[in-house]
Image (spheres, rainbow, N blue to C red):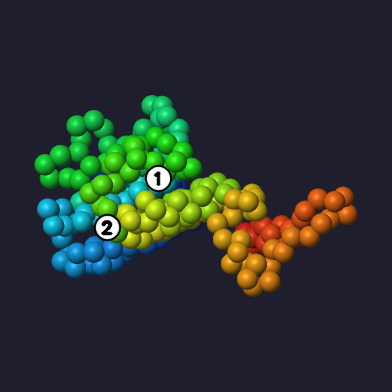
Amino acid sequence: SADCPDTFQRKETNIIQIGSLVGCVCSLVDDVEATINGDGNYNSSNNHISPLVLDIGAGKALFTRAVYETLRRKVPCVAFDRRHQCEDDLFYDPKEGEVDDLHEQPYTRLVGDVGRLSSSRNLDPLRSAKGGGVIAITKHLCGGATDNSLMALCRLPLSDYVGGACLVPCCHIKTKREQYCNVPYLQRHGFCQTHRGLRGNMQDNDFRTFGMLINMSRAK
């Protein structure tokens, strides 16, 4: 809309993608709200867990801002990324003083690594949503970062916070076997059994083949 920053999404496919993802996140927010409180009220109170959107690997936080504005700033959003932002990175963030603290939920930047997502410092901005109020989202996390996020979200202490997730991977074919979040599941179905190769090294041809198939599925 005219009230939102220019996202530079000129390609129709990009616009459709962003719109689809934002729609999924908004549906998750409604579902989580109904599950934890059952009253459809986004405003937190002493007995109310407020939904909160956590964008992992947010980068310049275009996706975070799109969700924040679509939800009419009624749901707090946290943009989490390991980079310390420069001026260009903050282009999509609300300007200082632009968020009405009395009538709008906060928009927060949080610097940290996905591998330390569950540290106490990173959990502090999520306290209001503890008990299943956090909706974790990602857009195009590289390589094994999606798997790292899944493992962190499904384990304590973060599992006490998360009520929903919408994770969109990127270049998943670069994920290494040791980074993958659930090799035992694949092994139970007969895949990813290691064997010793011709040079004496342990190999897993199945996992490499899965990566190739993922790459082929992206071909246009």
Q: Is residue 41 left or right of residue 70?
A: left
Q: Position of residue 69 (x, y in %)?
A: 27, 48
> Which quadrant of the rendered structure holds the C terminus?
bottom right
Quadrant housing residue 210: bottom right
Badge 1 amino acid: Ser
Residue 208 visible in rendering: yes
Residue 92 visible in the shown view: no
122 lies above or below 74 = above
Q: Which residue extends farthest front?
A: 156
Position above or below: 137 against 209: above
Q: Residue furthest top?
A: 87
Quarter of the figure with residue 103: top left
The image quarter in which residue 58 lies? top left
Pointer 2: what residue? 131
Q: Residues within 10 Å of mark 1 (few under 14, many from 20)?
A: some
User: Disc 1 or 2, which lies upstream in sequence?
Assistant: 1
Q: Secondary structure at mark 1?
A: loop
Residue depicted at x 59% and y 50%: 179
Crowding at label 2, few (<14), some or many (≥20) Cα neighbours within 10 Å? some
Give amino acid for label 2.
Gly
Nearest the viewer among 163 and 169 is 163
The x, y position of residue 76, in whole percent, is: 25, 47
Q: CA distance from mark 1 to mark 2?
A: 15 Å
Residue located farthest toward the right when viewing the structure as drawn: 198
Q: Residue at x 77, y 53 (%)?
A: 202
| Residue corresponding to mark 1 | 118
Q: Position of residue 218 (x, y in %)?
A: 62, 59
Tag count: 2
- Give the residue drawn at x 23%, y 49%: 128
